[in-house]
Image: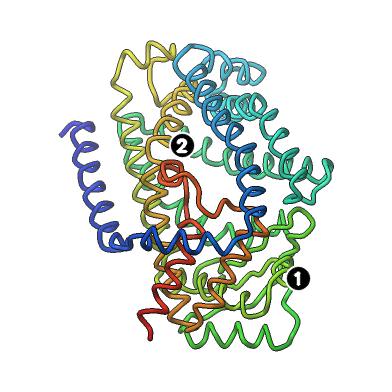
Amino acid sequence: MAPRLWAGGALIVLLVALIGFAAVAVPWHRAPAPRADQLAALGQFPADQVARSRAFHAELRPLSYAGMLLGLLIALALGLTPLGARLVELAGRPFGDHWLARAVLGGLAVVFVAELLTLPLAIWRHTVVVRYGISTQTWGGWAVDLLKSFGVGAVLGGVVLAAFFTVTHFAPRWWWAFGAAGAAGLVVLLSFVLPVVVEPIFNRFTPMADGPLRSELLALAERDGVPVKDVLVADASRRTRAVNAYVSGLGPTRRIVVYDTMLTEATPGEVVSVTAHELGHAKDNDVLTGTVMGALGSAVAVIVLYLLGSWTGLLRLAGVESIAEPRAIGLLLAVTTVAGLIAGPAQSFVSRRVEARADSHALELTGDPATFEAMQRRLGTVNLADPDPPSWEHAMFASHPSTVQRMAAARAWAQGAR
């Protein structure tokens, strides 16, 4: 059987597996609390606080949409014209136009150009978050973090580019099979590696001091049946006033992480409440679910790219002969950018359902809806979240239920628990 038929069959199998797994693992039935309850929760916020939050997001909104549009235009310019192919050629020329040099250096050059052209919007955004008091970073600290991000991205990107184009070079007919397996394996590997390798590059983590709060968090995890290696404090205050906590890692790398800002801004009960939410993700294997779905989705994406490689009109626009050659990196960027924009709302929808389940878990674990509601108010106030954003925007982009939806859900749970 021809490789394209095998690829088509594998694509169907992977799509069925992805849809079937999502149908079982994602809590699709969790709808937001009634609108009347949300409006009642909104009334708990001071009017000036709501106005300040909405003014903050009104300034960020044009930046977000401009960034999406600019990123799309840059990707299309690099991918649907010969511009990207020529950039790859220039990057590989000092090394004798070797295919590996084109793959790694050309790929990094294409991504760097895209990042450089969108840098003014990132600078503008930092100006806004500093003015509203969310960011505590100096421009020097911000620039260092940006360079760290570029460095991590360059290392990971270089490895992926080298591996991908090595496969396409030595297995031109069957690269889709090796590439799909490799992409899926990389997603799984990064789920274990990122928390212990990449996170310390951007934050310093120290064990939480012995005391009542540490003991309570460890006892909470034990009662929930979620083994954790440690409770750590992240030095988030050196870059932000935002408060947060999370459970990071899988299996032996799992730990509870609390922002130091959370310890100063929130009550111990609120720290316990947000940790209970994060333990819900671990209890329901949400990280594992996301890893599996990400692995399947990555494998699907590689096969789709392979099948797109026969679209001669697309290749002609990019000025390349094959989507598997390094000169087609710009085209790959364009395709993945468009795919990301299309898939974004669906990913946000799934995320909101998963987060709502974790909220329910926190309420069941602590049995304290009043503190849960206070914690949501605290998060919304300190982080300057819009407690009740525009419904269409929330549906398209939000990864969590809105603050008033979460507060209303806590009240509904309290009514049902009586």
Q: Is residue 178 left or right of residue 363?
A: left
Quarter placement of the N terminus: top left
Residue corresponding to mark 1: 264
The first of marks 1 and 2 along the sequence is: 2
339 and 263: which is toward the camera: 263
Q: Is residue 229 left or right of residue 80?
A: right
Q: Dividing the picture into quarters, in which one does residue 194 lie?
A: bottom right
Name which residue type carries label 1.
Answer: Thr
Name which residue type carries label 2.
Answer: Phe
Secondary structure of the residue carrying tag 1 is helix
Q: Residue at x 68, y 76 (%)?
A: 267
Q: Is residue 242 left or right of residue 163?
A: right
Q: Residue at x 35, y 31 (%)?
A: 305
In the rendered image, residue 401, in percent from the top left (x then y), is placed at: 45, 57
Secondary structure of the residue carrying tag 2 is helix
Residue corresponding to mark 2: 164
Q: Is residue 306 above or below residue 138?
A: above
Q: Is residue 266 above or below residue 391?
A: below
Quarter placement of the C terminus: bottom left
User: Viewer-nearest of labels 1 and 2?
Assistant: 1
In the rendered image, residue 99, in percent from the top left (x then y), is placed at: 52, 24
175 and 15: which is toward the camera: 15
Q: Dividing the picture into quarters, in which one does residue 323 lie?
A: top left
